[in-house]
Image: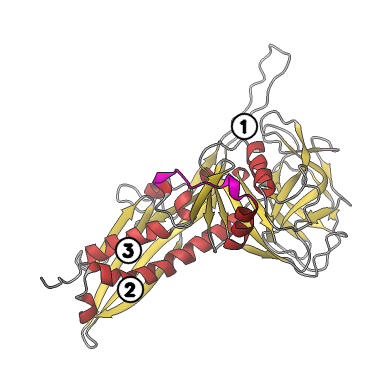
Amino acid sequence: MGNTLLTIDMIGNEALRLAHEKATFIGTINRQFDSSFGNADGKIGDTLRIRIPSQYTRTQGSRVMDVQDSVQISTSLVVATQDHVDMRVNSREMALDLTNFSKLHLEPAMATLVSGIDGDVLAGCTKLTYKHAGNWGVNYTDNTAMTAVSSLTAAGNARTRLNQGLAPKGDRRVQMDSGMMAGLVTGVAAYFNPSNAISEQYREGLVARTAMADYYENERTWSQVNVTSVTMSTTKLNGHISTLGQTSINITTFTNPYQIGSAFTIDNVYDVHPETKAQYANLKQFVLTASTDASTYTISPPIYMSGPRQNVSGAFTATTLAVSNYGITIVGTTTATFANGLMYHKDAFTFATAELPLMGSSEKCVRKTFDGLSLRVWQDSDIRNDELLTRIDILYGYAAIRPDWACRIIGN
């Protein structure tokens, strides 16, 4: 029996299947907001404000009420990035069966599309993650020493950081490149057993489960480059922080701006338990998210010295944090490029796609959606060259909604 011409529905379904399979990172994070974008019942534009849960302080040793306002803060999920992959096939190639067409055309096309998106989202989420861990002491005081991740020390430290942020114990994942994974598996082979997470086995890159997390091998993890101009021993802060939720710091001693995504600690500024506000033994960790000039930087998380959202402790008052001459320590070694693995709870980040509008007749343009991924396949013919032009589009966005539930795993 001869082959039948491929229909656009067949191509759309196969493209979605391939995309779903190859989504190594975006397939493992929160996608509950997809239905908010682009549906016919009520479009919200390209931005969704996501509320962050309220926090409160405890009244101790008194029967008198101390009624607190519910102060809502939010983060924004913007779905405004449209990527696509384009191809042309002739009539003969369209006469192939789906298996051969998928192998020759769709699989490489979808690998390119999804790999690029997966890498961009993973890199973006890693740069927004301020917690970091390596083969360091329990208090993370020697975070400039870069050593290979060859034991569960780094993963255990990352697990501690998630636990300190009160991340739920389930649905934790780790993304590592093959170099870091090879060192880890070689060092702790006895702890790695085949995964019994049957529902996740269709995902590319799933290696095993240990230390309360599923481990994925992903070559798209972000590598950070520290340059010679990073003079960590002489960097000092300037001024003071007097506004709760302040997101900027001033640096008085520097050479060149630091790299966006650089993680660091501030001398004498310690982390606290999110609920009890008791001081932890380790310094608070931050990340540079933007630079406005050579000496002013935007950081995450915002600094709260007091109140229900207090997230730092140390030798300062509840109303002002004098940081003049406090040193900062950028993680990593100068002139070094080092890998950033990522341990995270699935709700630390969110990824959403919007339903793109159908163009022309339904015979030439279809939309397929499954498990938080929405693709549009659009075709048109080129009669002069006997070719069928095909484009596969995805409109997406991502955000860090609970970055305190993630931690980088850093090593060389």
At mark 1, the secondary structure is: loop
Circle 1: residue type:
Gln
User: Which residue range is magenta in the image?
Assistant: 188-199
* Residue 387 rendering spot, x and y as whole percentages: 24, 82
Q: Is residue 132 above or below residue 180?
A: above
Question: Residue at 12% across / 73% down in the picture?
Answer: 2
Q: Which mark is residue 15?
A: 3
Give the number of the mark in front: 1 or 3: 3
Determine whether the residue tagged by mark 3 lies in a helix, strand or loop.
helix
**Residue 73 image offset from top left, x and y in percent:** 58, 40
- The three-letter amino acid code for the residue at tag 3 is Ala
**Circle 2 sits on which residue?**
105
- Cα gap from disc 2 to disc 3, whole angstroms: 10 Å
Asked whether residue 340 is drawn in magenta, I would say no
Question: In this rendering, does residue 181 appear at all?
Answer: yes
The first of marks 2 and 3 along the sequence is 3
Residue 199 position within the rendered picture, expressed as x and y whole percent measured from the top left: 39, 45
Q: Categorize mark 2 by other alpha carbons within 10 Å: few (<14), some (14-19), many (20+).
A: some
Which residue is labeled 1 in the image? 55
Q: Amino acid at mark 2?
A: His
Circles 2, 3 touching at the beta carbon (< 8 Å): no
Q: From the viewer's perspective, tell me whether residue 247 is left or right of residue 50.
A: right
Q: Against 6, is 344 above or below?
A: above
